[in-house]
Image (cartoon, grey):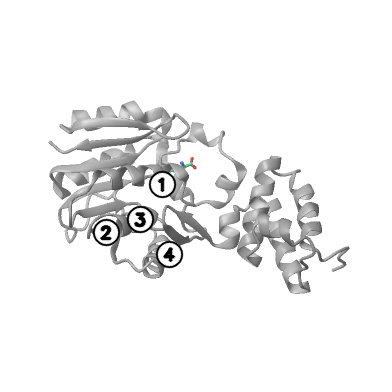
Amino acid sequence: MQWKSNKLTYLKKQYADELYEFYEKGEANTILSILIKSFFGFSRIDIALNPDFRLSESEMLKLHFAVKELKNYKPVQYIIKKTDFLNVRLMVNESVLIPRPETEEMVSLIIDREKEEGLHVLDIGTGSGCIAIALAKNLKNPEVWGADISAGALSTASKNAFFNEVMIHLSEFDILKPTEPKALGEFDIIVSNPPYVTGSDKVLMKENVIRFEPHEALFVPGDDALLFYRAILYFAGEHLVKNGRIYFEVNELYGEKVTGLLSSQGYTSVELFKDINGKNRFVSGVKG
Ligand code: GLN
C-alpha cells in the first residue's frame, strides 16, 4: 500500500472526506473519532494537541480496513466491538443489537424508581445484557435474570456480566412458545425491549441497521406489533408477583396500544413516557 503521509491529522482528514459520501458530515466525523480513540487512544483534543503524531504501517492498515467497513455501513460499534451503556462497558457483536440511548433512558427510569433492596428482576430478550447488567450494577443487591432465544446473545451477555463483575442468571428460552421454563420463579420486576419494528417501519430504517443488526432482535414477525407484549404479559400472569412492575420499551407508534393492553389486563398506574426525542417510548404498569 502507498501512503502519502502517516500523520494522523492528515489521515483523519482524508478519511473524513471519503466518508462524507456515505454519511452526513457530523456523523462521519464522530464515527471516525470513535474509531481513532478506540484503536490508538487519541481523542479529538489529543489529536489537536499532537498534530505531528504518526501511525505505524500496521496501524495505518488497521484504520484503512476499518474505514472500508464503514463504507459498507458496518456500525462503528461492531468494528471496535464495544460500546458504553450508562456506567457499563459492553462487548458487542453481530448477534446482539447495539444498545440505544433510548434504552438507557428506560433503565435510568427504573433505577430512579426502584429503591427496594433485593428485588428479583427479569429482562426478556436480554441481547448484549445491557439492561440486565446495568440493573444488576445500579439497583440495591438485586437478583437479576436475563432471557433470550439466541445462544449467541446469551454467550455475549455472559461475558459482559463477567467483565463488569456482576452476577446475573441467564436462561435460553423463546417467550413466544407456550412452554416457558417452569424453573423461572416469580419476579418483582419484568423488563423488556422486545422486537417492535414492523414491515412498514422497515423502509424508514438506515442501511447500517438493516444490513448488520440481528433481525430477530428488531423485527416483529407477521407485522403484529403487539405480539411480544402479549406474550410477556401472559408470562407475567404466572411469573410477576402481585404489585410487581412491568417496564416496556415500545415502538413510538404503539405506545397507546401497549398502555391499553396493560390496562385491559388489570394493571394499574399504567404510564406512557416519551424519550429524549419526544417520542412515545416506554410503558410501565403495576400488576393488580
Ligand atoms: N429502537 C430500535 C431501532 O429503531 C429497535 C429496537 C427494538 O426493536 N426493540 O432500531
Task: Give neighbour class at mark 1: few <14, some 14-19, many 20+ (Cα, 10 Å).
Answer: some
Q: Which residue is mark 4?
A: 156
- Marks 1 and 3, the one that precedes in the sequence: 1
- Residue drawn 26% across the image and 59% down it: 145
The reply to whether the C-beta atoms of the residues labelled 4 and 3 are less than 8 Å apart is no
- Marks 2 and 1, the one that precedes in the sequence: 1
Distance from disc 1 to disc 3, alpha carbons, whole Å, reads: 9 Å
Count of numbered badges drawn on the protein? 4
Q: Amino acid at mark 3?
A: Ala
Q: Residue 222 at what x, y percent from top left?
A: 41, 38
Quadrant the C terminus occupies: top left
Helix or strand or loop: what does disc 2 sit on?
strand
Q: Which residue is mark 2?
A: 145
- Marks 4 and 3, the one that precedes in the sequence: 3
Q: Which residue is mark 3?
A: 134
Q: Residue 195 at what x, y percent from top left?
A: 40, 44
- Residue drawn 62% across the image and 55% down it: 34
Helix or strand or loop: what does disc 4 sit on?
helix
Q: Nearer the viewer, residue 173 or 38?
A: 38
Residue 266 lies in quadrant: top left
Quadrant the N terminus occupies: bottom right
Q: Residue 155 at what x, y percent from top left?
A: 40, 66
Q: Amino acid at mark 4?
A: Thr
- Residue drawn 87% across the image and 67% down it: 2
Q: Which mark is residue 104?
A: 1
